[in-house]
Amino acid sequence: MRLTERQLAVLEAASATDERTVAEIGGEIGLKPETVAGAAFDLADEGLVEVASVTDETLELTDEGRTYVDGGLPETRLYRAGIDAGADADPVSMGAVIGEADLDGPEVDIALANFARKGFGSVDGGELSIASDADPDADPEAAALAALADAGEAGLDAGDL
């Protein structure tokens, strides 16, 4: 087998004892990481090097996520509107609370699906009741969205979330 210049450069820069990233090798030999990766996979096909893959997952806030960071999750808005309407003392009309929470369209379904699941209260016969021990400020989903918002455009490593 005859090696190309790129393959030879990658082979010479590779270490027999230490793992090296394509970025490290590329920086050393002046090639783009994708060029180094291609050459490394060609060399691996010939049995000259071993290539290990590592996947980094970075999370970023979507437009919908930004909306929920700014205005609150639908189920949290439903909870707070329920508190304002007195649903922590007596059940109140779900329709009135939904209107006060400024929920419409798919947000209503999201709020209703997550409200009971998160232990914020219950909906029974069109009436909403608030659980006295509910703490929407301790919601891990809201905390995750806030962490993503704080990370900004750089995103957040999935392992850090």
Image: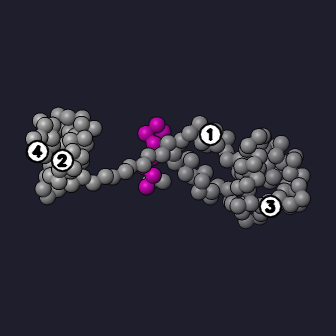
What percent of the width, then of the height, locates residue 85? 85, 51
Amino acid under disc 2: Leu
- N-terminal of the pair, mark 2 or mark 3, is 2
What percent of the width, then of the height, locates residue 155? 45, 42
Residue 116 numbered mark, or none = none
Q: Viewer-nearest of labels 1 and 2? A: 2
Q: Which residue is mark 1?
A: 64
Q: Which residue is mark 2?
A: 43
Residue depicted at 63% across the width and 56% down the height: 139
- Alpha-carbon distance for marks 1 and 4? 53 Å
In the image, taking residue 16 as reference, residue 153 lies left or right, namely: right
Q: Viewer-nearest of labels 1 and 4? A: 4
Q: Residue furthest bottom?
A: 133
- N-terminal of the pair, mark 1 or mark 3, is 1
Residue 158 highlighted magenta (yes or no): yes
What percent of the width, then of the height, locates residue 115? 73, 56
Q: Which residues are magenta?
A: 152-159
Q: Viewer-nearest of labels 2 and 3? A: 2
- Alpha-carbon distance for marks 2 and 3? 61 Å
Q: Quadrant of the N terminus?
A: top left
Q: Could you say which quadrant of the image residue 100 lies in?
A: top right
In the image, taking residue 152 as reference, residue 71 lies left or right, namely: right
- N-terminal of the pair, mark 4 or mark 3, is 4
- N-terminal of the pair, mark 4 or mark 2, is 4
Rendered view: 86 above or below 61: below
Few, some or many residues within 10 Å of mark 3 (<14, 14–19, 20+): some
Amino acid under disc 4: Met
Q: Secondary structure at mark 2?
A: helix
Q: Viewer-nearest of labels 4 and 2? A: 4
Q: Which residue is mark 3?
A: 122
